[in-house]
Amino acid sequence: MNDFDNHDDADFSARRKPVGEPIEAEVVEYLSPAPAFCQDCGTPLEGAFSCRVCAERQQRKAANARARPRETSSITSAVVLYFVLLSSFAILFLDPGNVNLEIAVGILDALIVLIWVVVHRKQVVPLMKLPSNPLWLIAGLATGIVTFLVTHFFLEVVSAAFNVPIIRMTDEYFAAGYTVVIPLLMIVLQPAIVEEFAFRGVIFNVLNDHLTLKEAMLVSACMFAVLHLSPLAFPHTFLIGILAVMMTYRTGSIWPGVLLHGMHNFLVLAEEVWWG
Amino acid sequence: MSVASCPHCGASVSGGSFCGSCGKAVSAGTGGPQIVTGGKIASTGAGARLQSEELAKKARSAATALLAVAILSAIALALLAVLFNQPDLRVDWSIATPMLIGQALVTVIFFGLWIWARQSPLPAAIVGLVLYVSLVALNAFLDPATIAHGIIVKVIIVVVLIRAISAGLQHRQLLEAHGH
């Protein structure tokens, strides 16, 4: 005896339809019709059982997740770092020309950036490796020479055309009795390392989590140029910012940008000390 | 799964935000339409479209703020040029020329940011905020009395730019959450 035979005959006969009645009526009563619209987004299904729009959206979300595997960080962090560095410049206005104060502010800036590097270490530490192709280091140095020549030409033209004096940075150090070592540290080494870690290490990476790559490059370079608080320096600092961030992104290493920045600043110093 | 009937066509709806029969939006089952406020992001496609329009509109207000700064900067440039050309004023052109060049550059940059903000408000608002606050700070470092000049206008511009950045970020999060 099979299971069918175990049904209570009285109950079964009560639910059974009379002979001759079309069976479709019962099917319609118990099954809901196939949906004509996606219940998640309202798009017409056009004969399909699953929504093409939702499926494509899921694919794009998965692609976005693959493209941005890093942890996202708050954009506020980048903006706050910028304004903290800007505020440290304010200290210099308390006593303009005091090189000891400049050295103290340089050390303070280094500590500030170190704090941000520690906070964003997951994004910054991978940039500390050398580029896979060492030629990028030479390219960084060569680009620094090019940016110096462009800057030199631009400032000479502006100075000659509008009778604008070009500010010398080393005179105050020598007047205070320092040898060339301190200007080398404060004009060449400190900005090259501290500013590169701040703008290409932290700010660019944070912005890149929220903006497109081009936008992040442009915004970080603009912030770098504006921080120098000199309209005449804006064009060439913006150029250095763009080139350094492109090198950092292309190589995955911060060092080509550091060498670019360092070489540019070294040539500015060398022009003042040895060629000027 | 709770089964409800569509208020538009009467078909039974089991889950989802839209009726499978007529395609119209239905209540989420928690008491009618949801109000999406603060940092929350709309969960439905229709809600996301509405929220996206609202956030994009708020982000575009950055363009208005940047245009206002550009116009104010242009007026300041014109006033400086007129002032420096007064015949009875002895002007030190080694100071006046960099000031005029700097002011002209700032004007051009803010007009450029205004154009950029119409296409892409978020990055333009970030650069605009950074540049504007830096210029205000620079003036304040050189002459602390300038910080009180036009303080209400300065605060309004900064607030509009911060709100535009916030809206722009939320707009991008929304687009990303919905796979755009």
Image (spheres, coloured by chain):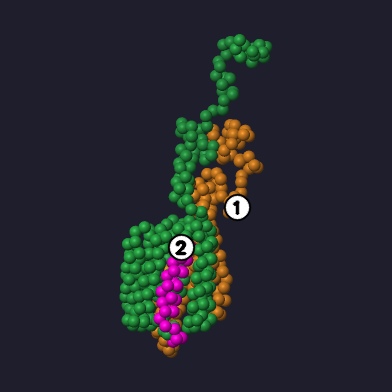
Chain colours: A green, B orange
For the N terminus of chain A, give its image quadrant.
top right
Q: Is residue B147 magenta?
A: no
- From this viewpoint, is residue A240 visible? no
Could you say which quadrant of the image residue A235 lies in? bottom left
What residue do we see at 61% from left, 49% from top? B35
Dividing the picture into quadrants, the one containing residue B118 is: bottom left
Residue stretch rendered in magenta on the structure: A175-203
Image point (47%, 45%), residue name? A62
Residue named by callout 2? A201
A180 inside magenta stretch? yes
How much space separates mark 1 and mark 2, taking CA atoms? Answer: 34 Å
Tell me what residue is drawn at x 51 percent, y 52 percent. Answer: B173
Q: Are marks 1 and 2 in contact (CB under 8 Å)?
A: no
Q: Identify residue type, mark 2.
A: Gly
The residue carrying mark 1 is B37
Give the image location of residue A170, x and y in percent: 41, 81
User: Mark 2 packing: few (<14 Cα in 10 Å), some, or many (20+)?
Assistant: many
Which structural element holds mark 2? helix
- Rendered view: B174 above or below A127: above
